[in-house]
């Protein structure tokens, strides 16, 4: 006979793992990898120190899993926004502005900024972690955006001979002004200012790629 599975036990393990990852992100971001203590992470997660080691083995693995987890969350949010380009409707400009606003909100999210600062702070010790973000988020999101722009080009809605370049430029038109206005995430930007950035980005993009 097979061993019975305890749903409550599985749920408890998942909940503890989630709590540890959230606490680890907060502590790594606040104190840096070197100064971050597993005991502090455990305390913030509300679990025993041994529980952290049982789930992740060591502190470096915990850092890597934390960043990978955040990367997956960011990718999911970006792909959800980009997916809306699959049903363009009659007003492409309005749709691009809607998608652009969602992408801008993802980019300006506090956790996204904190993650980018953490990666920069730990780059010397863990340079390969940038590949996690570029590979799991940036590249996959740009590929998805390029695919949607290619489909719009085939439908005659855009004139993007190089959809990958068009996707990179659309992304840059959003992110570069936001970097400046937020001072690399150290200043909150009013919603009307974010919308103005998006409107200008879409206007510039369509000036280059409208048929």
Image: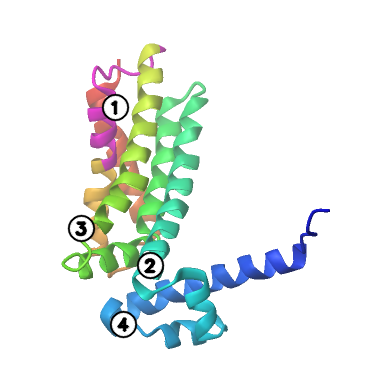
Q: Secondary structure at mark 2?
A: helix
Q: Which residues are magenta?
A: 155-171
- If you read the primary sequence from the N terminus, does the residue marked by circle 4 or circle 3 appear first? 4
Is 62 in front, or is 110? 62
182 in magenta:
no
- Nearer to us: label 3 or label 2: 2
Q: Position of residue 210 (x, y in %)?
A: 30, 20
Q: Secondary structure at mark 4?
A: helix
Q: Residue at x 39, y 65 (%)?
A: 110
- If you read the primary sequence from the N terminus, does the residue marked by circle 3 or circle 2 appear first? 2
Mark 3 residue crowding within 10 angstroms, few (<14) / some (14–19) / many (20+): few
Quote the CA–CA distance across marks 3 and 2.
34 Å
Question: Label 2, on which residue?
Answer: 61
Question: Label 3, on which residue?
Answer: 180
- Nearer to us: label 4 or label 2: 2
Quote the CA–CA distance across marks 4 and 3.
26 Å
166 in magenta:
yes
Q: In the figure, 174 relative to 92: above or below? A: below
Q: What colour scheme governs how the chains and residues are painted in the rendered image of this protein?
A: rainbow
- If you read the primary sequence from the N terminus, does the residue marked by circle 4 or circle 2 appear first? 4
Quote the CA–CA distance across marks 3 and 1.
22 Å
Question: Label 1, on which residue?
Answer: 206
- If you read the primary sequence from the N terminus, does the residue marked by circle 1 or circle 4 appear first? 4
Q: Residue at x 32, y 35 (%)?
A: 202
Asked if residue 41 lies left or right of residue 164, the reply is right
Q: Secondary structure at mark 1?
A: helix
Q: Which mark is residue 31?
A: 4
Q: Position of residue 76 (x, y in %)?
A: 48, 47
């Amino acid at each position: 006979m097979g061993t019975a599975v305890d749903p409550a036990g599985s749920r408890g393990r998942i909940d503890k793992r989630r709590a540890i990852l959230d606490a680890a992100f907060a502590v790594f971001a606040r104190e840096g990898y070197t100064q971050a203590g597993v005991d502090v992470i455990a305390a913030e997660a509300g679990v025993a120190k041994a529980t952290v080691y049982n789930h992740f083995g060591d502190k470096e693995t915990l850092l890597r899993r934390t960043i990978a987890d955040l990367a997956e969350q960011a990718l999911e949010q970006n792909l959800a926004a980009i997916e809306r380009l699959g049903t363009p409707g009659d007003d492409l400009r309005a749709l691009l502005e809607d998608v652009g606003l969602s992408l801008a909100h993802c980019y300006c999210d506090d956790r996204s900024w904190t993650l980018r600062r953490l990666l920069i702070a730990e780059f010397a010790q863990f340079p390969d972690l940038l590949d996690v973000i570029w590979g799991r988020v940036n590249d996959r999101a740009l590929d998805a955006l390029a695919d949607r722009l290619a489909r719009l080009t085939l439908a005659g809605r855009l004139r993007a001979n190089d959809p990958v370049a068009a996707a990179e430029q659309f992304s840059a038109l959003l992110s570069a002004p936001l970097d400046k206005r937020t001072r690399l995430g150290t200043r909150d930007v009013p919603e009307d200012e974010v919308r103005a950035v998006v409107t200008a980005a879409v206007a510039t993009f369509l000036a280059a790629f409208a048929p």
